[in-house]
Image (spheres, helix red, strand yellow):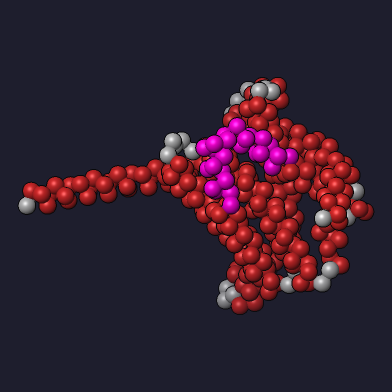
Amino acid sequence: MSGLLALLDDVAAIAKLAASQIDDIAAQATKAGSKAAGVVIDDAAVTPKYVTGLPATRELPIVWKIARASFFNKLVILLPIALLLNAFLPWLLTPLLMIGGAYLCFEGAEKVWHLISPHQGSHLEQAETLDAAHLEEQRVKGAIKTDFILSAEIMTISLAAIEADNVWVEGAVLAMVAIGITAAVYGAVALLVKADDIGLKLSQVGRLGVTRWLGRTIVKSMPAVMTLISSIGTAAMLWVGGNIIVHGLHNLGWHLPYETIHHFALTVSQQLPTGQGFVEWLVTAAADGVIGLLLGFCLIPVTNLLLLPTVNLFRKTG
């Protein structure tokens, strides 16, 4: 009997330890995911544009295609790569993160440039001449490419925020972050792209006048909402990209940009009696965004005149 009680005590202790580890993993995942909030906002804001102009019946299937690829990118490709790099080549994480940040700066600056110089048109606008099937394929490929970069940023930022020496705990936390963020982002995207259909349905079948009014309001406001979301996505690209570059340079030993922005934001926030923390964050984000925009403008001619012709040349010769 005493042996059975001892066994039950051992089982209870193991269960208690497992529960505490699960709680710790969940807490670490929440903390790590919050560190990547800027990239998450960017991801959620950028994706809806890829279904704009396509048949309504294809919107959710397209979102699902991108979401499925995002799960694969994070869990199958990026998670093991991140763990291996962190274990054997941790010094390489910052440069790789900065490369991704530079790409975000380029993408954001290119969108701003197309607003300034619309006659050149963007690759998405040029794609409108394609038939629906080819346009959908091109949109999905573009979305998956952008998602891969953003997913790499999310996983790397999250990994840096994990406080654990156990590779299995790191892997579990990263997996939880990947699943939670992807589900949240693409759930929100699906809701956004179908909001006009929901509003139309409410306006037609709503039993109450206020319900029908709400439906009509949703339908009328969605173009402005999508435009706002697109603008937020562009701003988030520049902010996140600039922030990654500034922090990367700081980690690599060049402290001037980071310290200058920090000192400027602190000085501005101290001039106000309240909301100093928010103002300091806002000024920092704005400064990071300006740096991201300037860097992106510098990368546009480099990419269009040097990198793309080189890639195309290799494709032709290959």
Q: Where in the figure is residue 187, as x and y percent of width and height? A: 58, 60
Looking at the image, residue 219 sits to the left or right of residue 311; the answer is left
Q: Considering only vertical position in the picture, is 242 above or below 42?
A: above
| Residue located at (73% from left, 53% from top) | 230
Q: Classify residue 141 by image quadrant.
A: bottom right
Q: Classify residue 270 by image quadrant.
A: top right
Q: Where in the figure is residue 123, as x and y percent of width and height? A: 83, 57
Looking at the image, residue 269 sits to the left or right of residue 80; the answer is right
Q: Considering only vertical position in the picture, is 202 above or below 238?
A: below
Looking at the image, residue 122 sits to the left or right of residue 267; the answer is right
Q: Where in the figure is residue 214, as x and y percent of width and height? A: 63, 66
Which residue occupies the extreme right position in the image? 119
Q: Is residue 86 magenta?
A: yes
Q: How many marks?
A: 0
| Residue located at (73% from left, 57% from top) | 142
| Residue located at (6% from left, 52% from top) | 1
- Decide which of 170, 41 is in the foreground and name it: 170
Residue 184 seen by the camera: no
Q: Is residue 90 magenta?
A: yes
| Residue located at (60% from left, 32% from top) | 91
Give the residues in magenta. Answer: 77-102
